[in-house]
Amino acid sequence: MNRSITNLFGLIFLLALTACSAAPLSQPEATFTTSAIGYPAPNTTELVPATGYPAPEAASPVPIVTSAAATPAAEIPPFDQSSCPVDDTGRHVCPADSPLGQLGCSWIEDPNPGLKDLEPQNPLNLCWVIGAGGQRLPAEEYVYRKGCMLPQYARFVVQQSGEFVLLKSRDDLQKAYAPITSEKEALSYALAATGFQAISGFGAPPNYRYFIDQVKDSGAVLTDQGYLVNLYDYRLCGCGPHTTFAVDILVKADGTVDEIGRTPAYEDPEQDSLCVD
């Protein structure tokens, strides 16, 4: 009898032990906020979907190319583009018999907003010219040149008293806008004469290659020789790397423009394999 009771208690203990070992332990449920790249996102940091790195609060992830480093000023007066209708590519193409076509413009384009401080402030547009059959024009026939295998030549057209006036060269630009009497005007004039870029608020992308300590905002400073303007020139043509250069331009009061220095500034490694003809 005593042995049967002992055996019964032993069986009950064995059954209880087996049930405890089979039951799962109670745990708090884990919750995660998942970013676009699939990793848990910290509660205090926003993630950039493309890279997963924290998004900067003040700096832009890409360069901000603007008209000038100075505060915004008056806009360029509107230009009458009605004689050059927009084609399928979005260009204002000028028929040969139109007023601007007769001035030699293949198409016209709104100028860089940075030209807003030119004096006098007349409406103006870029007038793009392509040499017949791809023929290259002499330097005295254009203000600056763009394009690669097929050069595109920049001139300006100014609207004065309802008439279009062609500025086909730097000499014409000089006659129209000299003397240069302020830093703001010098910056606008350098942009018009060279076609280079003014940069303000460069975001310094971390993947770029840099050759200078700082990409400075564009601006102009009065010196004994004239106005020293710092601009940037991106080299598109050919195969990579495609370098952006920091360029020093000297603008004199009489409208003379000279490039006096050029230094590699930065490159985008993603463009190393890019070839542009």
Image (cartoon, rainbow, N blue to C red):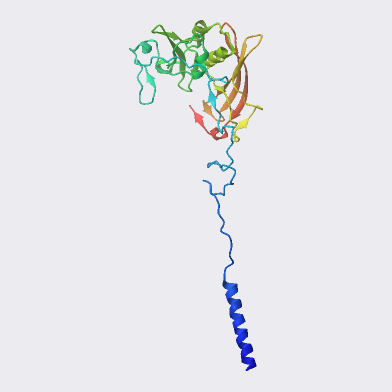
Depth check, front residue: 250 or 239:
250
Residue at 61% across, 81% down: 14
- Furthest-bottom residue in view? 1
- Furthest-left residue in view? 97
Residue at 49% across, 17% down: 145
Residue at 52% across, 32% down: 274
Depth check, front residue: 123 or 4:
4
On the image, the x and y values in percent for residue 23 come to 57, 71
Q: Is residue 273 left or right of residue 100?
A: right
On the image, the x and y values in percent for residue 257 come to 57, 11
Q: Is residue 136 visible?
A: no
On the image, the x and y values in percent for residue 114 come to 52, 18
Q: In the rendered image of this protein, does residue 255 appear above or below residue 267?
A: above
Give the quadrant of residue 212.
Answer: top right
User: Which quadrant, please, contains the N terminus?
Assistant: bottom right
Q: In the rendered image of this protein, does residue 205 appear above or below residue 76?
A: below
Q: In the rendered image of this protein, does residue 169 appear above or below residue 65?
A: above
- In this figure, what is the number of numbered marks? 0
Depth check, front residue: 54 or 169:
54
Residue at 55% across, 52% down: 32
On the image, the x and y values in percent for residue 246 come to 61, 22
Depth check, front residue: 136 or 158:
158
Q: Is residue 184 visible?
A: yes
